[in-house]
Amino acid sequence: MSLFRRSDRSGVPPAYKSRLEALLGSPVDGPDVEVTFTWESPEEARQQLDRIGAMQQELRSLKKDVTRKMKAVRDSYGARRAAVRPNPLLALAGRKQASQSKSARRERLRARQEAELSSYQVTRECIDGLLLKLDSYERKINAWVARRD
């Protein structure tokens, strides 16, 4: 049994990857996700703006979920590191060995925490990139509509 949630080659945990793919309607292969919008009339542009607004709202909600999960992971590992006690057998051998053993166990826990958090960090970066792209499209569409009206 593994302590880590496995993510695919994109680095995004499967639960979040499926939500992103459902939202975007295309596969997510990594943190650099492409999204495009097309419109030819002011009505289509307004529909795309509505779609962008809904996507932004869903992405912000997803980012909050990811942030909460990251906080839970940090809290969990923080409690585990705080609970590390020196090995009583090593304490008999000497204070230095007991301290080194305790430090090594804490360091292993910290490394596990970083490994688990890395996939969530990739997910947040992906969401941030998407939000920036959506903001850019929103500005382009609004400028296009303003020129047409």
Image (cartoon, helix red, strand yellow):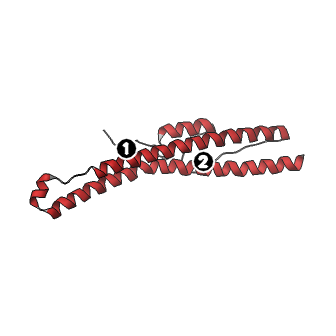
10 Å crowding of disc 2: few (<14), some (14-19), many (20+): some
Residue at which label 2 appears: 33
The numbered dot on residue 4 is: 1
Residue at the image point whose x is 44% and y is 43% from the top: 7
Q: Which residue is drawn at 52% across and 40% down?
A: 17
| Furthest-right residue in this view | 149
Residue 61 bears which disc, if any?
none
Q: Viewer-nearest of labels 1 and 2? A: 1
Q: Which of 24 and 84 is in front in this view?
A: 84
Q: Badge 1 local density, few (<14 within 10 Å), some, or many (20+)? A: few
Measured as percent of width and height from the top left, residue 83 is found at 27, 49
Residue 28 shows in the view = no
Horizontal and vertical percent position of residue 50: 74, 38
Q: What element carries label 1?
A: loop
Foreground residue among 74 and 113: 74
- Left or right of 2: which side holds 128? right
In this rendering, would 64 be left or right of 118?
A: right
| Disc 2 residue type (three-letter) | Val
Residue 5 rendering spot, x and y as whole percentages: 40, 41
The tag earlier along the polypeptide, 1 or 2, is 1
Instruction: Count the numbered circles shown.
Output: 2
| Residue 77 seen in render | yes
Q: Are marks 1 and 2 in contact (CB under 8 Å)?
A: no
Q: What element carries label 2?
A: loop
20 w.r.t. 93: above or below: above
Tell me the residue at 59%/35% (across/down): 22
Which residue ends up furthest to the left in the rendered image?
Answer: 92
- Please state, as top left, top right, bottom left or bottom right, where the N terminus lies in the image: top left
**In the image, residue 52 lies at what x, y percent?**
70, 42
Give the amino acid type for the residue marked by disc 1 in the picture: Phe
Spatial CA span between label 1 and label 2: 25 Å
Instruction: Indicate the quadrant where residue 62 lies.
Output: top right
